Image: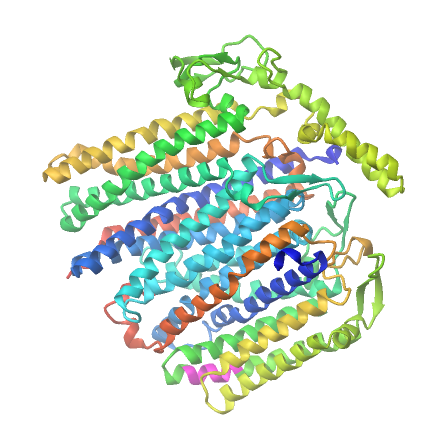
Amino acid sequence: MIGNLDYSTLQQIWWIIASLVGSLFLFLTFVQGGQTLLFTVPRGDEEKALIINSLGRKWELTFTTLVLFGGALFAAFPKFYATSFGGAYWVWMLILFTFVIQAVSYEYRKKPWNFLGATTYEAFLFANGSIGILLIGAAVGTFFTGSSFSLNDLNQVTWQTPYRGLEAARNFFNLSLGLFLVFNARVLGAMYLINNIDHKALTDRCRKSAWKSFLWSLPFLLYVLVNLLFMQGYARNPETGEIFLQSGKYLQNLFGCPITLVLLLLGLLFVIYGVAITCFRGRNNGIWFGGIGTVLVGLAVFFLAGFNNTAFYPSSYDLQSSLTIYNASSSHYTLTAMTYVALAVPFVLAYIAYVWWQMDSRRLTIDELQSENAEEMY
Amino acid sequence: MVEQIDLTQVNWARAQFALTAMYHWIFVPLTLGLSFLVAFFESIYVRTGNEEWKRLTKFWMTLFGINFAIGVATGIILEFQFGTNWSNYSWMVGDIFGAPLAVEGIFAFFLEATFFAVMFFGWNRVSKGFHLFSTWMVAFGSNLSALWILVANGWMQFPTGMKFNLDTARFEMQNFWEVLFSPVAISKFTHATSSGFLLASLFVVGISCWYLLNERHQTMAKRSIIVAAVFGLLSATYVIFTGDEAAYTVAQKQPMKLAAMEGLYVGQESAPLVAAGLINSAKLPGDNMDPFALEVKIPGLLSLLANRDPGSFVPGINDLVFGNQEQRVIGAAERIEKGKIALELLRTYKDARKSGDQAGAEAAQQAFAGYKDHLGYGYLNSPSEAVPPVGLTFYAFHIMVITGSIFPLVLLLILYFQIKGNLASHRWLLYLGILCVPLGYVSSQAGWVLAEVGRQPWAIYGLLPVTVANSNLTTGAVLTTFMIFLAIFTLLLVAEISIMAKQINIGPEEN
């Protein structure tokens, strides 16, 4: 059946798959959000160790999802991969640096002779959770605000600013999206820790922190949403493939593709419900609502950018260099082959869920950190 | 396009790729092999129920974890660097090259990431059996990820299963299975992973030798030596077998790399193998200078290695640069001419399409078919550009082989005396066992230097030179990121070695 799918269907399927992986990554940034709580929420080393060990069992999932997001975009939309990574060089490099320093920090923080000292590794984790997520948000923002680049006949990119992508963080829309993601990650991080750790004083502080971060996230979320409804968008003429500016484009996308509207509203409701039951009902399962909500909002954002004849990686410098899911994708053959491969995704999700359930059926306690397996703990 | 090439920028981008790949490869082979060794140790623990084996497992697992973390840290950049620094490459071959990377993420990385947490934190949270299963999954996941990335690298060495699309000016996949089962990909995978098994065995044996020398943790050390030496010897045998296969595929698919590996300038029948030698660095293709200041040759062996026939002809660098009609070798000089025609026809085709000249486009397309195999050569300016750095390639190959041939002998001796029960009294052998650890790393690094430097000037062998594959960046930007990577990775390496040394010094927990 997959072998008979036409090219544009496959292109759309792969935009959905890439969006799903990207949105799952946004959910999994609860790890990064949790990392930013390290300097303020825990009191004393024991509580800090609880947070590190709780997040330390999940950080690789987030990291791997980011790598898969990159791999999926490389395979399915290589022109985007080439244009954005090769063009917005500095923004991606800075994001990568924060993930490089994250990867060693859990393992090395508490080990004797770790050369840099525990505080440095904690600072690395904080930088990853704050700067890393902020820049990812700013980069996603350019899906709507556009970037300054042009492509020649052979699709080689020329970036028009010397800041190579960092200029994205100067745009208030992009910055707001980035800050929203940072605070949302903090909300998710706090809710995950509440779910995962058995320590009343610490989880009580997490609840307060979740509420505060949620309030901080609201103005940025509102700014992004209101702008999205009214801003000009990069539309594609379905007959000629020509790109043109259209006012209210994303508003039209919301109503032209009602599923996006449903995903957005449902997602926001889920996040709000998750926060409400965490902060006011003392429940521990808010992370699931917050997580599902984040995935739904993420899907809505990516769908708004890519579907309904929209350029998902627009060039504000040269409209016709803008990338759409139709002109940036791999060939029909590769998309077909990769769709067969993607059939494995539910299986992968299933064993991740099974292992998560096996490992987290009991909540983490200070006693466990001091048990016979203490030397394995972070 | 070619006119705008900034060679300094390309070279810094190459240096950055070399730096990050070499750092990454310090940690990967140990992960590949130690994951299996830990799985062996834990399997023995689960079978015997002996807590000593559990202690031993946990000790090696701790070292595995320290190494794994920095392996992950240095790995992420490699995937994204194709986009950031080699964006033209990413666009031109993303159709083929991106697929194995995505498959690697789906199939392998999640296995590692998911079961790693169980392996380290699941001792009291899951059953003994499920824990052991998780340890095995981490080992399979690590090696599965090696498969996919080596398939991708194998394709760069020997591009297959694709066609060139004139409209998009890029290479597109035609046959996924041809890419996956290409002989170069298979030999790369088997050789690289088995060399990782060997390196990890040397690591375990070397550290155990150190304990024996210091009369500490002797029971654990002896047990570790038995398992690791057996695994190492089996792996070494396989490394030799796959190495021979790798050399054969290089000879068949990348004759220029083979010629550089051996410093062979003038092709000949019954070509001798240079077992060791000093390269004459002033030697250029086509001149009359002796390529070696000093060399030791074994008659006929290169022909046997290259073609499985001791009397066969092996082309040299001169043949591959200038051509050899008698042996029907097309030289780079002729290929450059044809490549330039191919590029011109590509431009004609694109112009015709743009102006709506259907007949012109078709004519250009038909003519292009006769020259397409030489397209990559059209980007070169002189035939000597097709020659990789001979000295580096030659020395890397010989360092790999010479150091590599010491390991099975040392492992065999260590295993023999361990079984006899008097290993500890042969202190020289214990020192040799320790020395093999750094030598193992040197050998392993040399292998990759050979593979990658020997492929130059190509990003994709014969199709796309590095000078066209890169991103449009300033030299300053790439130089800056190079320096940042150098600083961060060196800092992290120092931390890793320091932590590792301390953990080895502490040793396994006592009862």
Name the outermost residue toward the bottom.
Answer: A281
* Left or right: B97 as drawn, with respect to B191: right
Which residue sits furthest top?
A: B288
| Residue A205 colored in magenta in the image | yes
Q: Position of residue A7 (x, y in %)?
A: 70, 56
Image coords of residue A215 (percent x, y): 60, 83
- The question of residue B3 being in magenta is answered with no
Residue B208 placement: quadrant: top left
Q: Which residues are magenta?
A: A203-210
Q: Is residue B424 visible?
A: no
Q: Residue at x 54, y 88 (%)?
A: A276
Closer to us: B393 or B126:
B126
Residue B34 in view, yes or no = yes
Whole-percent x, y for residue B188 in the image: 45, 38
Residue found at x 33% / y 30%: B403
| Figure quadrant of the N terminus of chain A | bottom right
**Closer to us: A172 or B69:** B69
Q: Residue at x 54, y 31 (%)?
A: B455
Residue that appears at 55% across and 39% down? B155
- Tell me: B197 left or right of B228: right
